[in-house]
Amino acid sequence: MPAQPQILATLKEYFGYDTFRPLQQEIIHSIFEGNDNLVIMPTGGGKSICYQLPAFLLQGVTLVISPLIALMKDQVDGLLANGIAAAYVNSSQHPNEQHEIYQKVLDKDIKLLYVAPESLSSLDTILSQVKVSLIAIDEAHCISAWGHDFRPAYTQLGYLKSKFPETPVIALTATADKATRQDICDQLNIPEATQHLASFDRKNLSLDVRPGNKRIEQIYAFLSDKPNQSGIIYCLSRKTTEALAEKLKDKGYKAAAYHAGIDHQKRSQVQEDFINDTTQIVCATIAFGMGIDKSNVRWVIHYNLPKNIEGYYQEIGRAGRDGLPSSTLLFHSYADVVQLQKFADMSGNKEVQLAKLDRMQQYAESLSCRRKILLNYFGELIEKDCGNCDVCKNPPTFIDGTVIAQKVLSCITRVKEQEPIGTVIDVLRGAQNAAVQDKGYQNLRTYGIGKDIAWRDWQQYIIQLINQGYLEIAFHQNNKLKLTALSKKVLFEGEKVSLAHLKELEKAKQPVVLPTDQGAAPDLFEKLRALRLELAKEAEIPAYQIFNDATLREMEKFRPMTDEEFMQINGVGRQKMQNYGYQFIKEITNFSSAKTKKKKKKSAKKGNTHKETLVLYQEGWSIEEIAVKRQLAESTIFSHIMKLHQEGEPIDLHQFIANQDLKAIENAKQDLDNPDGLKPYFEHFEGAIDYNTIKVGLTILKEDRKTNALQ
């Protein structure tokens, strides 16, 4: 296995990041150890690096199975932009072009080769002549009939492990419940695969669910403060995508429709325009977005109820892949449910699809924290509400539901977790039907203990318990209700349960305005964005493949003006620094110079502003008080103090830093090998020590070193 310093150096050199995201390092180490792996990581969580980085360091070629041509092209373009040799093979290419790629593989000039499952057999001869170092199967949920996007062509992939028994296999997907995860491993012949489940919590996504009344008017209101932001509106029907796109265009938005009924060339153009920021909004059926890695989608709207939670979560995950705040909005109606039930009736696994649709409907109608429901669905049990969804922002009235919960959980225990919701309710209410009496449930202690509560009310209470993580549905076991770790706390540890008052369910929800982007002043960001677009057009690649919005925001914040400073920005690797560093540094320098001139001109009559700070400081005012009095930011006043200290004013910096923080900075200075800049320290402390304190600490340590040298 490569040494850790080499792995980290590769991460920075070719991908532009100083540290790994959660689980990435564990997965990469597991691959180097030769293990098979199943990775469940939400959209935007960094799945690709988990196999792309090892591929670069391993001897041989990495084979990547990918379901869509657009997805392959996007990934390969991104790798080439980072200086990593990659290619793809699919049916859209001319045979001559494919033969050139095959020759590069044989010549060991390709590190990653992407291929669609349908084209895999054409590579048998080539792959038998080279070392296949790693096999990565992207969108692995497609192999499972339990998954939400089953593709028959994926079922052939199980032979790969037999053909390359010594080659580690990594299967990756954004969403998969327990049944799907097990099915993926079984079908790929990797039953002992190490399973890595990343947190599904995308804190940057706000969640809003509303009844589907006057949807167009609500969409106009939603978009009113998002004039230049990219977004996707998912619709059930082709007709709706076209009608909605026309209405948005009439309102002045750059919108387009996308669905399977549009000819291939036009669909490709719509996708290309969206990727390149020429089209702002795409109204699409669910097929759109899977094949692109566009990082600056700021919002996603579901015009209709999705058919299951897996698909919904994957689709909203296409917003905010760069980690910046992004909004999601879901409309739902009874008509949507009826339409989706018809679709399920025509599917091959009707019962499973209907059960998952029920959970989707329960999510939409829930009065519990939305994020808690989503995370609980994927087995990530959390107890605190998120504060960033419509329910948390407008909470319903709650009652003490502990006794109700205890009755339900006890009943499920008595029936040995072998029954679905309907039978459990029948037992609670003392029903005398065959489903109860044939199994002897009338003899249970919990039989009839809930006669005083109506059947529908029991249903709603149980749905709330599922949504809060006290129960889960085993879809692959005829929808049986199962206890969780949280339910045992209620039964045996006296945990209290709050349930929403059922009268709240009858109230029509009012639209909630959720927060949108809260970035810094857009001046420099917009200039960097315009430069990025100009460079992207010249290179004929998507703008986000140069730098994503999060990287531009970091440039805006830290204003790098040298190559070394520019390389410290997240998302800037060596290749991109060489390709684009000069242009971006020049833009930042020009912007900062213009700002400085403007400030100097404005303060010409005021004299040296830091001297005004000195007068107030000498009068005994604190930094906070000076900032308020002068109507400046505390960071600005702090910079004045540091400048005054450098000019020789008798200011004791020790008053601005605790002894333990100074000691921590001194230790970090040694651990990090005395890095340039403040950012490595800030990241080392994970934000626990702010930049001002770090700057003070380093200044004190530097002065102490000089003093000791003189002595």
Image (cartoon, helix red, strand yellow):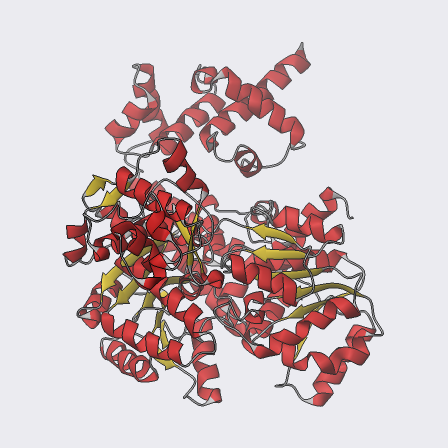
- Residue 492 in percent (x, y) is at 40, 33
Instruction: Pick the residue in front: 56 or 364.
Output: 364
Q: Residue at position x 52%, y 47% from top?
A: 560
Question: Taking 328 as reference, is 344 above or below it?
Answer: below
In the rendered image, is residue 649 in sight? Answer: yes
Q: Is residue 333 left or right of residue 711?
A: left
Instruction: Pick the residue in front: 281 or 337.
Output: 337
- Residue 549 in percent (x, y) is at 45, 57
In the rendered image, is residue 295 in sight? Answer: no
Where the C terminus falls, by quadrant? Answer: top right
- Residue 116 in percent (x, y) is at 63, 77
Q: Residue furthest right?
A: 129
> Residue 425 lies in what quarter of the image?
bottom left
Question: Taking 26 as reference, is 275 above or below it?
Answer: below
Q: Is residue 379 left or right of residue 432?
A: right
> Residue 377 lies in what quarter of the image?
bottom left
Q: Residue at position x 26%, y 48% from top?
A: 448
Q: Residue at position x 38%, y 40% from top?
A: 383
Q: Residue at position x 47%, y 16% from top?
A: 654
> Residue 299 lies in what quarter of the image?
bottom left
Question: Taking 212 as reference, is 504 above or below it?
Answer: above
Instruction: Pick the residue in front: 502 or 113.
Output: 502
Q: Residue furthest top?
A: 711
- Residue 580 in percent (x, y) is at 57, 60
Instruction: Pick the residue in front: 140 or 458.
Output: 458
Q: Is residue 510 left or right of residue 684?
A: left
Report the number of discs: 0
